[in-house]
Image: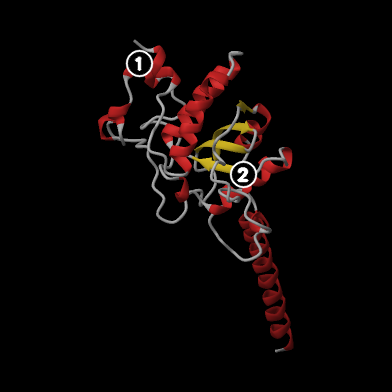
Amino acid sequence: MPKKRMIYALLCSALLVCSSTACNYEQRVQDSDYDYGSRQAGDPKMLGSRMYGTTTSNPHQHDNAFFEYSNTLSKKVTNLNGVAAANVMLTDKNAYVGIVLDWTAVGTRGAGGNREQLNGGKPEDAYNTSRVSPLEDNRLLVKPYQSYFSVNDHNELSPELKQTIATRIRELAPMVQEVHISANMDFVNQLNDYAVESWGGRSLTPHVDAFNTLVKYQFIGGQEMPKPITSKKIP
């Protein structure tokens, strides 16, 4: 009997060690940028004040005097798990981030968030394909089908994902007043248009008014959506 009790005690200890290891592993994953959906207490991604979205009371917050593409910040956000690609624009007030998702992390969409892509079936079954002309299609960063993923409403993105992105932005751009993030298909493709202009050495100054119209439409319910730069080049 003593020998059996000793064996039982050793087995119990081994099980406790294994259980503890599993719990520690699960905790590490939940605390990392592989998991934006667990919402557990004490997640280091959510400690401190909210870093994204509207944080000031200025009614003219989106009246930007200029904007520029940031290659450094775009790479910083793209390197996060769950993000396939990102374009970051800096202004005299804010940072605006357009992201494309790749599902390499869980919980990137908030509860009820719907992706816009159909990556299977026929192209004509996809979301809003009628908006995309054959001439424009190959210029787009994200498409309605056979593409990385977008989410129509920025409010449907995980708060943990947005907080993680905003924290990365503020680490390198501490003077930014607000950080606004969206995975909306139109917004992402418009920011990509501006990034392409910047890569080509062309000034973004002529596009400031259109840019302000875009961000107001996306983040504060503006009524007008500017035309993409690419559509203006296509006869």
Q: Quadrant of the N terminus?
A: bottom right
Residue 202 in sight in this render: yes
* Res. 178 mark: 2
Quadrant position of residue 226: top left
Is 57 in front, or is 218?
A: 57
- Rendered location of residue 3, percent (x, y): 73, 84
- Rendered location of residue 231, percent (x, y): 39, 18
Residue 35 in sight in this render: no
Q: Nearer the viewer, mark 2 or mark 1?
A: 2
Under mark 2, the amino acid is: Glu
Q: Secondary structure at mark 2?
A: strand
Is 43 in front, or is 8?
A: 43
- Give left or right: position of 149 versus 175: left
Callouts 2 and 1 close, C-beta under 8 Å = no
- Give left or right: position of 35 versus 172: left
Classify mark 1: residues with Cα within 10 Å, few (<14), some (14-19) or many (20+). Answer: few
Vertical position of residue 39 compared to residue 230: above or below: below
Under mark 1, the amino acid is: Leu
Q: Quadrant of the C terminus?
A: top left
